[in-house]
Image (cartoon, grey):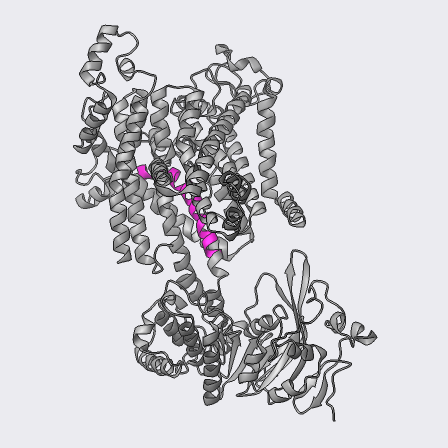
Amino acid sequence: MMPGWRRGLGRFARDRAAALGVALLVVLIVAAIFAPILAPYPGDVVDFHTANRLHAPDAANWLGTDRMGSDLLSRIVFGARITITIALVAVGSAVVIGVPIGLLAGYYGGWPSNLLMRVSDIFLAVPQIVLAIAIAQTLGPSIENVILALSITYWPFWARLVFAETRSLKNEVFIESAIALGASPLRVMVLHVLPNIASSIIVRTSIGMGGTILTAAALGFLGLGAPPPTPEWGRMIAESREFLPEAWWYATAPGIAIFVVVMGFNLVGDGLRDFLDPRIRRGAGGSGAGAK
Amino acid sequence: MRRLEMIVSRLAWFVPTLAGLVVIVFLISNVIPTDPVRVLLGENATPAQVEAMRIKLGYDQPLWVQLARHFRDVLTGNLGISIYSQRPISEDLAQRLPATLELTMVAITLSIALGIPLGVVSALRRNSLWDHVVRVLSVSGLAIAAFWLAMLLQFLFAMKLGAAPLNSRIDGFGPTPVTGFMIVDSLLDWDMDSLRSALSHLALPALTLALPAAATIVRFTRAGVLDVINSNHVLYQRAMGLPPGLIVWKYVLRNALISTVTQIGLIFGVLVTNAVIVETVFDWPGIGTYAVQSILQSDHKAIIGFTIWIGALIVIVNLLVDIVHSFIDPRGSR
Amino acid sequence: MTALLAVEDLSLGFATEAGFASVLDRVNLSIERGRVVGLVGESGCGKTTLARAILGVLPRDSARITGGRVWFRGTDLLTADPEVVNRTVRGRAITFVPQDPFTSFNPVFTVGEQIMEILKWKSPRADLPAGRGWLPAVVSPYPPDRKRADVDAVLELLDAVQLPRPDQLLRKYPHELSGGQRQRLMIAMALLPGPDLVIADEPTTALDVTIQAQILGLIRRLASQRNVAVLLTTHDLGAAYEICDAVAVMYAGQDVESAPVDRFFANPAHPYTKKLLASLPRADGTAGGIPGEVPVLIAPPGGCRFHPRCERADGPCREERPPVESLESGHWVRCYHPHREVA
């Protein structure tokens, strides 16, 4: 398999769109990790300087200042931390919960599995954001609650996906022979099924990160994310509304930040799809604003 | 016969699905640490007041009793009273639903009108400059936050250029409300001024919703057309010398459209998702704004009512899409 | 020239990720009117590519013709006006029977609609428009009296290919029919326009063994009745023996031998042909093979491409492709060391 991998990796490296995506993600990660160093006014995450409020971009504040006079660039850079955290934890926990459930349900079958999948279907019948709004509103505004709401509404997607793929793989000859040779169910699931569905999971994880960030930003926009002064991008856009059209920079900067980050994840996801399995049809199960 | 079976089985699952939704939403809102009664009354309420309200609203009963009562209420269409408007929630939702539906339907039409031709041409001129531009735009369209796009369009077209109104559905009183759909009612009244006003107000919100949806449609259509173009039946028709235009616009298009139809259900879900947020930006009097207001007022029951309605709406739309699909694809469900 | 179709020194290749694959190398082939010619070779030898090149439906992105001509009724199809070729040759004078009849039907239209579409444009009763019709093809009308005549012709031909209850059959969708029925329909569709040449690309490969013989017999019978030439590509020598008048062999993109069917099987001249015939399973159950592997076409062997696997190969074989040597009437071979007939 090695020559195939190397050629695929070469394809991935030459795929300019995927390379751009990786570059954008690197920017995000660097901004998040090195925020205290990179931000020109790190204190502005909490500090405010009302004398300086709503200044257009200039040499002192490259992206201008917000309604409290804080430097937008610094707040956005620190907001990257929040964005990454939400994306990683929400998607990560949804995958960690959903994939094993899907594996078990797909492998064992029977009425408990079907019941579980029906429950997942119910969750999936409603757009993620609608349920997430209900949950986040109930729990109260905070980043943790946003993450919780997002993971609760996202795990069914993974469970269903892995269930379907496990069930179809189960009929494949190589699985049947593994079982016939006496492999334990755990072995079969982890060593035989999982590697085969791994590429599908990886691709959708990347695209899912993008969608999750958009949903999280929407929750922040609605006021369901962390309370001020947390520099959450969605909330910042909401704050900027009343100052349009004069303070255009206030609304533009966080929006572009969201766009850049989501683009990064989407491009990487598409690139991974081409690299890992060119046979997966483009667009089937692709990204959509809010949809996964 | 198979089609009938499908419809019947889907309808049969409709009820348990919604029931499950009701249960889940109920559990979410009740098995949680925060106290809805306290939230309702505010922080200054005394313990006595809280207790009194709790009994009044029935929160003192055991959970399963509350659930049973909840079911009874939902089945009779009683979703409770909105704290904000002091009216039954179902009434509020019913009054606002046409606005959201009209917006969504216009947005879907726009996105299809944009997305399918672009997708087809993009596939036919694969790897040309045109194709690359369209693909870049469609990938971008999926990365933009809908609410931000709404604000951007508002800023550009309404505030700066003055080309479109800023918000709400119509200027003045509008046509006689028969269906609640401004376009339909204006035509029924033959009120051209209202029609013009309604359309201009629909422009920006519908565009905001249509662009990300169009991006998705372009991707699916392009993939679908490429798939068909490389198929053996197209090769056969080419080998037999059928006119190329005929092959594309009669045969390839039909195959690609069929696979696009199955995605309409998905797209509708995305549209509704975005509509919730976009309505607030444009002050659109639909159920999305209602939901958001309910959030801000911590109007618990209203949010639950909204969730149930949206769930039902989407399940119905998905069923309709599947029915249409079963009519146009003779191969049956795959 | 008397030949209906004459492929002359045709060379073409495909651009791939790994380089340019030289799929056809100066191939020659000729077909007389009314004769059934078998084109035989292993998978990947280029026979399907040759068929598609004659039809003019090579993959547009990657295929490049690097030389040669395809003469049909005196015109070179490669250099003629493509639109004229599409209107007058494809689907009229030259028709096609594909390998897989299932995927060659559009799944969402009935077979009847698809047959009538072919006839709408390619019926022998249709006037050839002098120039382009001004209406776009999608909305062109179908003259009702011609349509009636065409429907009669369809029903008659469906009878000839032994499809029962044709009117009911035409209302069905492709997935509702069996493989044999679909291929019979394909044969009918190929004959309805009244062609001079039918190109059948491995028409029985996708069918059950029990049906293969029926379909082959049908092709032979109808071709003889209507004096239609057939180019039949196949990797099944038995099929070639059954129904062909002449057989041509290809190896790795090169044509190596061609002979009338009796001489072909009795006195194969090219070493590859001889080995092919020898590898057929024998009555006692044994079967041979040919040592070695088919070459990769991106960097093919020079000269005669079979030389790495040929025990007769020597210097000239590796350098320069053998010229055509005519052995006897209609039997030619390209080899420096062919098997000669024992006198």
Q: Quadrant of the C terminus of chain C?
A: bottom right
For the residue pair C247 and C10, the one nearer the viewer reads as: C247
Q: Is residue C137 left or right of residue A259?
A: left
Magenta region: B199-226
Q: Visible in this render: residue A257?
A: yes
Place of residue C15 in the rendered image (x, y in percent of width and height, measured from the top left)? 64, 61
Q: Is the residue B4 above or below the residue A130 in the image?
A: below
Residue at 50%, 38% (x, y): give it. A186
Q: Is the residue C305 above or below the residue B67 in the image?
A: below
Secondary structure mostly taken by the magenta-highlighted segment of the chain:
helix
Place of residue A58 in the rendered image (x, y in percent of width and height, measured from the top left)? 57, 21
Place of residue B324 in the rendered image (x, y in percent of width and height, measured from the top left)? 30, 53
Residue at 71%, 88% (x, y): give it. C326
Q: Quadrant of the N terminus of chain C?
A: bottom right
Q: Point out the residue furthest to the bottom here.
A: C343
Q: Is residue B228 left or right of residue C158?
A: right
What is the quadrant of residue A97 in the picture? Answer: top left
Q: Is residue B310 left or right of residue B214?
A: left
Q: Visible in this render: residue C67?
A: no
Q: Is residue C240 left or right of residue B2?
A: right
**Residue C326 drawn in magenta:** no
Q: Point out the residue furthest to the front here.
A: A182
Total numbered badges shown on the rendered structure: 0
Place of residue C135 in the rendered image (x, y in percent of width and height, measured from the top left)? 39, 69
